[in-house]
Amino acid sequence: MSEGDLSIDLDQAQRIIEAHLPSEHRYAIANLIVLQNQGYSHTPDSKTYVVDLLKPGSTAAPTSSCFLTIARPSTNTGTYPQNTLPLVANLLTLIRTSTAIPIRESTLDTSLSLIPFHFLLSPPSPFPSTSIVSLPVARASGGLSEKAQLSIDLLLGAFLGQLHNGVQNDWYGFPMLDNTTTPPKDTGYSWQETFTGLLEGLLEHVETDEAAYGVSLPYVDIRRYLSRAIGSFLFDDVEVPSLVWFTGSEHDIYITLPSGTGMASAEPGTIAAILPNVAHALWGDPLLEAFMMGPPDRVGEGAGPSKAFMEGYVGGGGGPVLVFGRQKTKRIWYSVFLALVVLTKYGPAADGEEAWVQEKRKWAREALDTCVSALKEAPCY
């Protein structure tokens, strides 16, 4: 199987399980299922599977599973570099040891001896793939009670509050695998300089090939609005660089299904797994989180997430990120940035792609139009 395919078969997955799960927990693979990353954290250089596990010789339905993420050894840096899988593993360790976010210790293998990719394998969890769904699917199904949805919002807010308060750095920008105290390229001690440099890079990239991306933006106006924001020091109110998941969204959160559909021992709405999709994480402003954008259909308002989410966020140690009008303007700029990252990571349209890919690209284009229009009169004071 070629590296360009970025996929593995059942035999390769079985070899991984046999090599890395403890000898007292030998499993056979019942199902190997690709999790379609339909969120903002999509990247063409990695893929995550959920692996249903059985005791060898068992004829019963699977009762446990694990997550397996594979990634190319050399990622395409592009305009917005992707964190390598070793760096992702390092960031997950940092989160696990600095917060109470329930991220289990996974096994990183970069040897290329089992498959032609780097991979990250989670320990087994006591539920099969049929017992969990992504949070957007659960919300859309109508199966979550109002109480369950409030509980999830509170918990997600608390997790992000812990992340931003508990995992911090000396400089802004892309994380490094080694613990250097010197800011690498595209980073610095000013968030305004770091962010606007990244934004300009993405804007220039899309501008030079806008036909392929299907956009036509008023670049002169955008740069004029950005100059106004810079002159008002809009992005210079960030005091400490926090680890920002950035493209993390509800698509990266999996919850248990109601009793009777697989996992009767857990309450419906329990968070079962947080996928390790931190390929775009960076040191920056907590408000940059996609979770802070609020409903996608209100992207041009800078309104922010639900009241329950923000209550959990403050309770988890997060600060007052969306209080003043200028902070809402800043959030709109961050939505422009997110849309540009999504557009470039999903890439130009290709033949045979699935409908959800087209929808995500469409969202990015529409978000850019909406946000740029909103920035015309958005306050910077």
Image: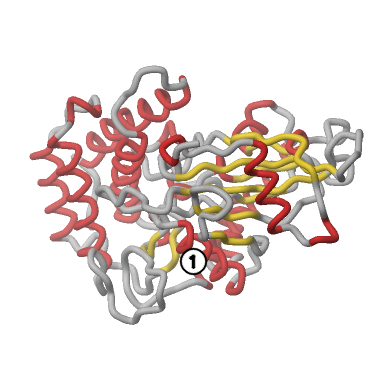
Q: Say if residue 162 shows up in the picture.
A: no
Q: Residues within 10 Å of mark 1 (few under 14, many from 20)?
A: many
Query: Foreground: 147 or 163?
Result: 163
The amino acid beneath tag 1 is: His
Query: Foreground: 42 or 101?
Result: 42
Residue 96 at what x, y percent from top left?
61, 68
Name the residue: 44% across, 53% down: 279
Name the residue: 72% across, 34% down: 31
Q: How many tags in the picture?
A: 1
Residue 2 at what x, y percent from top left?
45, 37
Check disc 1 and report the residue beneath it.
164
Name the residue: 19% across, 43% down: 203
Q: Secondary structure at mark 1?
A: helix
Query: Considering the image in quadrants, where does the C terminus appear?
Result: bottom left
Q: Is residue 337 above or below residue 192?
A: above
- List the single residue furthest toward the top: 352
Name the residue: 57% across, 43% down: 48
Q: Is residue 180 above or below residue 362?
A: below
Query: Foreground: 356 or 367?
Result: 356
Q: Say if residue 316 shows up in the picture.
A: yes
Drawn side of residue 44 relative to residue 370, left or right? right
Q: Quadrant of residue 205?
A: top left
Query: Foreground: 251 or 73?
Result: 73
Residue 175 at what x, y percent from top left?
38, 66
Residue 332 at what x, y percent from top left?
32, 45
